[in-house]
Amino acid sequence: MLIQKEILLTGYNQGFHLITNIILKNLPELPANGLLNIFIKHTSAAIAINENADPSVRFDFNTFINKLVPFGNYFKHTLEGVDDMPAHIKSSLFGQSLNIPITNHKLNLGTWQGIYLCEFREYPGSRNIILTVI
C-alpha cells in the first residue's frame, strides 16, 4: 500500500514549531507496519525530529542556528532579502525529509520526540509538505 497526501502549512514565523499533531491529523489510517516519509518542498525551511515537551528547546535551537548562520548582506544571493541565503544554508543543515517507522498502526516515535517545522525565513509564505505512507 502506498498513500500520498500534500498538506499546506500557513502562519508560521521564523523559528522551530512543533507540528506533530498537524501531521497526525492529516494521516490516513496507518497500516500495521510501514514507514512514513515526510518531505518539505522548500529550500528555506526544513523538517526535524527533536524534544517535544519543553518549548525552551525550540527557542534554544533558534538562538543557536541564528548565531551559527546570521542574517546579513554579506552573501551574494540577496535578491529575496538578507534572510534568504542564510535560510538556504540552514535548510541544508537540517534537511528536507524524515522517515518514521509505523508500528501497530502508530508512528513509532520516542517518548520525547516530536516533528518540527524549522522555518528559517523572517517573513515566510505557506509551506507544502508531502506525506507518503509506505
Image: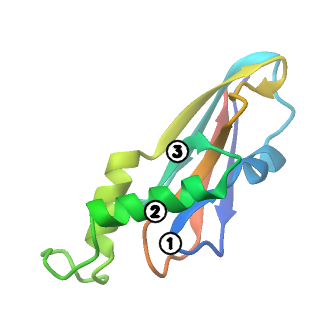
Which residue appears at 72% of the width and 24% of the height?
108
Write down the residue under mark 2. Answer: 62
Which residue appears at 57% of the width and 40% of the height?
49
Q: CA distance from mark 1 to mark 3?
A: 15 Å
Percent across and percent down for residue 43 are 38, 59
Percent across and percent down for residue 92 are 33, 50
Q: CA distance from mark 3 to mark 2?
A: 13 Å
Amino acid type shown at disc 1: Gln
Q: Give the crowd class for mark 3: few <14, some 14-19, many >=20 residues within 10 Å.
A: some
Amino acid type shown at disc 3: Ala
CB-based contact (under 8 Å), mark 2 and mark 1: yes
| Image height of 39 relative to 65, above or below | above
Q: Please tell me whether mark 2 sits on a helix, a strand or a loop.
A: helix
Which residue appears at 13% of the width and 78% of the height?
74
Write down the residue under mark 1. Answer: 14
Write down the residue under mark 3. Answer: 48
Amino acid type shown at disc 2: Asn
Q: CA distance from mark 2 to mark 1?
A: 8 Å
| Image height of 24 relative to 10, above or below | above
| Image height of 79 relative to 118, above or below | below
